[in-house]
Image (cartoon, helix red, strand yellow):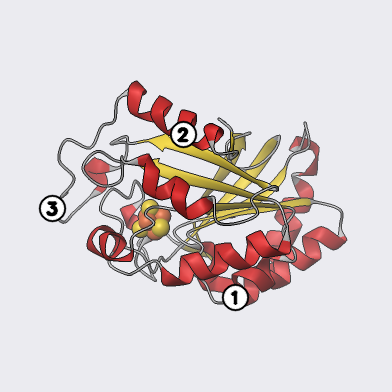
Amino acid sequence: MKILQKGFNYSQDGPGNRLVYHLQGCNFRCKWCSNPESMSADGVNVKNYTVDELFDEVRRSRMMFFDGGGVTFTGGECTLQHKELTELLKKLQAEGINTAIETNASSPHLTDIAENVDYLIADFKHYDTDVHRKWIGVGNEAVKANLEKIFASGRQIHIRIPLINNVNTEPTGFVNYFKQFDTENAVFEFLAYHEFGKDKWTQEYEIKDGFVSDETVAEFKKLFIANGLKVIST
Ligand code: SF4
């Protein structure tokens, strides 16, 4: 498997203390991406591991999985390596290790992969497919199809919405989309725009004035809660 970086993180990528693997490659081109070096299929600092090598490494890290922790696969977009990822997730679950993925939710394999995931985190960037295509390079049809299947299945899902000024700071369209579905087992989180990855861009960085105010984040929270959608912060 192609791994860009790895390290421990507490509570932000699933419950407890987690070993987080960033897998190389992404099929989206978000103009605010904080890991632009993860987009190409083969990055400069990428290391290759077999499924068994990663399985052994995770097992050896087990003492660190306190407070309900475990292992999280993110990216880039971890589902692009779905065959190896699924094999590894199965082995980890069989070993009793808590598994999580963070995904852009576009993969045709997502619902199959999710069968071996204890904690599912999915990003949702815009409800309008044309706006999605403008800022991300592709429409949102596959993302919506996956989320709608997951809502119908009733499985747990943690949906993260990055908020970027001039891109997606109008909450009504998000609420109108989500409130059509049974979101009993879904939680929603809003991530305010930051520029931690801006200096890593080798192409022009096209987001100008992307920061959002505390009032904008509060407005999202208020409208989601008023419509029966559960909001969390990590
Ligand atoms: S989906 Fe994530 S990794 Fe891929 S381009 Fe967007 S922000 Fe970057």
- Mark toward the viewer: 2 or 3: 2
Disc 2 from disc 1: Cα separation: 32 Å
Q: Residue at x 78, y 37 (%)?
A: 68
Q: Is mark 1 within 8 Å of ligand 1?
A: no
Q: Position of residue 43 (x, y in %)?
A: 37, 64
In front of the other: 91 or 227: 227
Badge 1 element: loop
Q: Does label 2 or label 1 sit earlier along the sequence?
A: 1
**Image-based side of 53 in relation to 130, left or right:** right
Disc 3 from disc 1: Cα separation: 32 Å
Badge 2 element: helix
Label 2 Cα crowd, 10 Å radius (few <14 / some 14-19 / many 20+)? some
Q: Amino acid at mark 2?
A: Leu
- Residues at circles 3 and 1 in contact by the CB criterion of under 8 Å: no
Q: Image height check: is 220 above or below 114?
A: above
Say how many tags the image has: 3
Q: Does label 3 or label 1 sit earlier along the sequence?
A: 1
Q: Residue furthest top?
A: 214
Q: Residue at x 47, y 59 (%)?
A: 104
Disc assigned to residue 223: 2
Q: Disc 3 marks which residue?
A: 204
